[in-house]
Image (tube, rainbow, N blue to C red):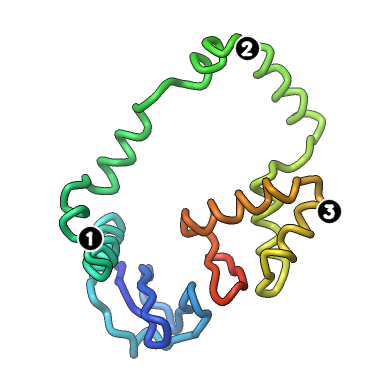
Amino acid sequence: MYAVVGCSECDALWVVEGRPETTECRRCGTRHRFDLLERFVETDDRAAAREARARMLAERSGEAESFDAVGSFEELESEAETAGVDDDEYLRESGVDAEEVAAAGERVTQSGGSRRRREVVVDAVHEQDAPTEREVVDYAEAHGVPADAARDLLEKLVRAGEVSEHRGEYRSV
């Protein structure tokens, strides 16, 4: 079972799987007893719960008409997978030898190579207690990620919903 619930403190909406005793708001960190939360939608289908939450957010922001014009999450995911060019074609058209790139990637993997920049920024948020942007950037720089790249990645993680920002502090979602 999946339920779309809302926070009484900050009005955030999120999807909860099952019937946990408590659940935490990803935006403000308030812990709520699940049995006391208003359940706006309950369904056995995760995709339906995600769609319901998205529709509610669109309606809140006055974008219901735009939401109706866009396909479902499943349709969009399918379109995204088939859109554009694949990696090999992109590299070939850019004048790069795709086989050499694959071989270089294999060498890094076998040698236990360094973490990707995104992983470093995610770790910076996970490992610190409600870090600020400066603390995330400092952590990332200490692990080899340039400050501008760390800021860009942090912003992308927030837009993707993997990290939340509230009053200048970041938390994992």
Task: Locate the N terminus and report the quarter of the image it occupies.
Answer: bottom left
Residues at discs 3 and 1 in contact (Cβ within 8 Å): no
Point out which mark residue 142 bears: 3
- Tell me how far mark 2 sits from mark 3, CA to CA: 31 Å
Q: Which residue is mark 1?
A: 63
Label 3 Cα crowd, 10 Å radius (few <14 / some 14-19 / many 20+):
few
* Residue drawn where x is 71% and y is 51% of the image: 120
**Residue 102, horizontal then vertical, whole percent:** 65, 19
Label 2 Cα crowd, 10 Å radius (few <14 / some 14-19 / many 20+):
few
Of the two numbered discs 3 and 1 on the same chain, state the one appearing first in sequence.
1
* Residue drawn where x is 21% and y is 67% of the image: 59
- Tell me how far mark 1 sits from mark 2, CA to CA: 42 Å
The relative height of residue 151 versus residue 127 in the rendered view (above or below) is above
Q: Which residue is mark 2?
A: 96
* Quarter residue 17 falls in: bottom left
Q: Looking at numbered disc 3 in the image, what kind of residue is underneath it? A: Ala
Label 1 Cα crowd, 10 Å radius (few <14 / some 14-19 / many 20+):
few
* Residue drawn where x is 79% and y is 36% of the image: 112
Q: Is residue 43 left or right of residue 119?
A: left
**Residue 111, horizontal then vertical, whole percent:** 82, 30
Residue depth check, mark 1 versus mark 2: number of the one nearer the observer: 1
* Residue drawn where x is 49% and y is 14% of the image: 89
Of the two numbered discs 2 and 3 on the same chain, state the one appearing first in sequence.
2
Closest to the observer, 1 or 92: 92
- Tell me how far mark 3 sits from mark 1, CA to CA: 41 Å
Residue depth check, mark 3 versus mark 1: number of the one nearer the observer: 1
The relative height of residue 162 versus residue 95 in the rendered view (above or below) is below
Q: Looking at numbered disc 2 in the image, what kind of residue is underneath it? A: Val
**Residue 143, horizontal then vertical, whole percent:** 81, 50
Closest to the observer, 170 or 103: 170
